[in-house]
Image: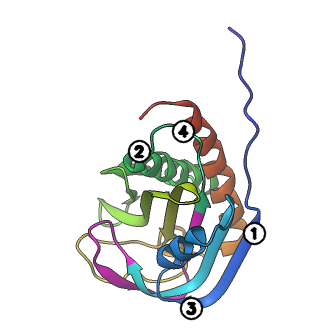
Amino acid sequence: MEETKVPLKKVEKVVGLETVPSTQDLALELARRGEAEGTMVLACEQTAARRLDGSRFHAPEGGIYFTLILRPRRADLCAFSLSRQAAQAVAETLTAVFGLRTKVKDGHSVLVWDKKKRQWKKTAGILAETFFEENGRVALVGVGVHVNNRPAAGKEPGLSLKQCTGAEISKELLLDELLNGFWKQYACWLQSAC
């Protein structure tokens, strides 16, 4: 059986901000203005980050928060399957880089096994949305990872990578690894069906 090689996409442009209400909301605004695939909105802090259910929360400094603008040419746009692929990329990256035991929950939450408490805790969340706009199909993939920040109390217990490893994590190096993993999963998603 012959292996099919697919060229990986990459981040073409970064819109970096210290603080933003929501990377997802800003990315949607930019996409509606025609911003190209591969544009990434990156922030150190989100004051009104958005969950899947539409509720808002504060994402403090110390985490990695970004949204990618994608313009897939697939006939269908299945946000759930794209979310699942992104979550899988994050989980696999955290396992590869830190040796952590991870799993994906509900297609959008990445959980890490807390050895001390002997329970799964949320370390990352994904928000994938798809739209049909005047200038074509748009998919947004938002990713939030608790890196060096202490997760706020929420619906489910959270755990940062710093709490898992006991050490400060380089957000820049981790972001590179997360993006490499995502682009591989995205290439697979582009060739698969929902």
Disc 3 element: strand
**Image marks 4 and 2: residues in contact by CB distance under 8 Å:** no
Q: Name the residue under label 1.
A: 13
Residue shown at 72%/48% (left/top)? 9
Give left or right: position of 7 versus 61.
right
Residue shown at 43%/61% (left/top)? 126
Q: Mark 3 points at which residue?
A: 19
What are the residue bounds of the magenta stretch?
Answer: 50-68
- Sooner in the amino-acid sequence: mark 3 or mark 4: 3
Q: Name the residue under label 2.
A: 78
- Sooner in the amino-acid sequence: mark 1 or mark 2: 1
Could you tell me the amino acid type at mark 2?
A: Cys
Q: Give the Cα distance between marks 1 and 3.
A: 18 Å
Q: Mark 4 points at which residue?
A: 74
Residue shown at 53%/60% (left/top)? 134
- Is residue 180 in view? yes
Question: Relative to 136, does residue 151 appear above or below in the rendering?
Answer: below
Give left or right: position of 63 versus 159.
right
